[in-house]
Amino acid sequence: MRIVSLLPAATDLVATLGRLDDLVGRTHECDWPDSVTGVPVVTAAELDPDRSSSREISDAVGGSAHSGSSLYSVDVEQLAELAPDLVLTQDLCEVCAVSYTRVADAVRMMDVGPRVLSLEPKTLNEVLGCVTTVGEALGVPEAAAARVTELRQRLADVEARTAGLARPCVAALEWLDPLWPAGHWVPEQITTAGGTPLLAAPGEHTEPMPWDAVVAARPDVLLVLPCGFSPDRTAAELDVLTTRPGWSDLPAVRNGQVWLLDGPAYFNRPGPRVVRGAEILASVLHGIPADPPVTPGEARQIT
């Protein structure tokens, strides 16, 4: 089978199911595992996130971090040359990856259309369900079932290790300007790791909120995990938060509990690594050791 992944989380799924050798095309953002760097890239970004501010990126998509004009283009000619049997995509967020609509338009221009599978999970359970869905599409349902069992056990282990501990109130931000709370599966990651999520409910497709709402929530812990930004990229723009009125009065700031996290790897993308995200949060919130240990590249405390 020839697979093209137009969603980084889908590339994660292909890898975790042992079918990376069948991947013939990927997005420019697919960066895990390292071996995918040799796979042809069939998308391009309209903006360079390393040279554009959060506000500039937001303005480019109509002021919304979840809708509006897509930031990505698809190389239709190259896609046709790769002749995929299966194209994996999504229709959840036009900023996170190429949308299903654009992929469908591209496929219609090909002589022989591949199967297009759109993944749109909104909760942790649905994320794990995607492992099953992709496993069936790739003809490896047994491997998918085993992987799901392993991932669920890891989540259960995190819950067991945080049971009975004090549950700090946690706010998670997935965009800096405008401020955007992390919804979908992130509140469940926080709950699993022994925290009480603020600002968003499990599965919620969130909207921008005023800074006053963050101040009023009085989080004990503040997680900063912008979509598509590495911790280093986030740190370069952190003054968007730190210069806001009332920043120094936040309990999280006073107690040194502001954390920069690797959003793309463990929180923004609905792939199997969200389980590692919950393990990282258990370490952040309660000091519970993860295996392997959490690195500064995964979670960095701001003092």
Image (tube, rainbow, N blue to C red):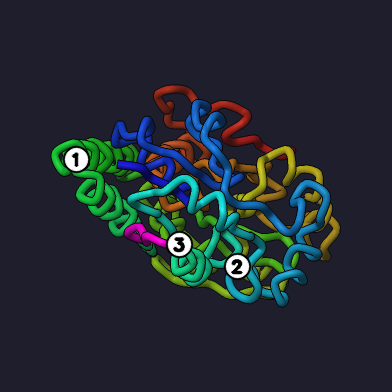
Q: Count all numbered tags in the image, as a single digit.
A: 3
Quarter the C terminus occupies: top right
Q: CB under 8 Å between callouts 2 and 3?
A: no
Q: As rendered, which of 280 and 174 lies closer to the eye?
A: 174
Q: Which residue is mark 2?
A: 217
Amino acid type for the residue under numbered disc 3: Met
Q: Mark 3 vs mark 1: which is more N-terminal? A: 3
Vertical placement of residue 121 versus 131, above or below: below
Rounded to the nearest angstrom, the CA distance separating label 1 from label 2 is: 45 Å
Majority secondary structure of magenta residues: loop
Q: Quadrant of the N terminus?
A: top left
| Residue designated by label 3 | 110
Q: Secondary structure at mark 1?
A: loop
Looking at the image, is mark 2 or mark 3 earlier in the sequence?
Answer: 3
Q: Position of residue 265 (x, y in %)?
A: 52, 41
Q: Position of residue 256 (x, y in %)?
A: 68, 42
What numbered label is drawn on residue 140? 1
Left or right: where 193 falls relative to 98: left
Q: Which residue occupies the extreme top position in the image?
A: 292
Q: Which residues are magenta?
A: 110-116
Image height of 125 relative to 178, above or below:
above
Q: Which mark is residue 24?
A: none
- Disc 2 marks a residue whose amino acid type is Ala
Residue 20, picture quadrant: top left
Residue drawn 64% across the image and 53% down it: 226
Q: Secondary structure at mark 3?
A: loop
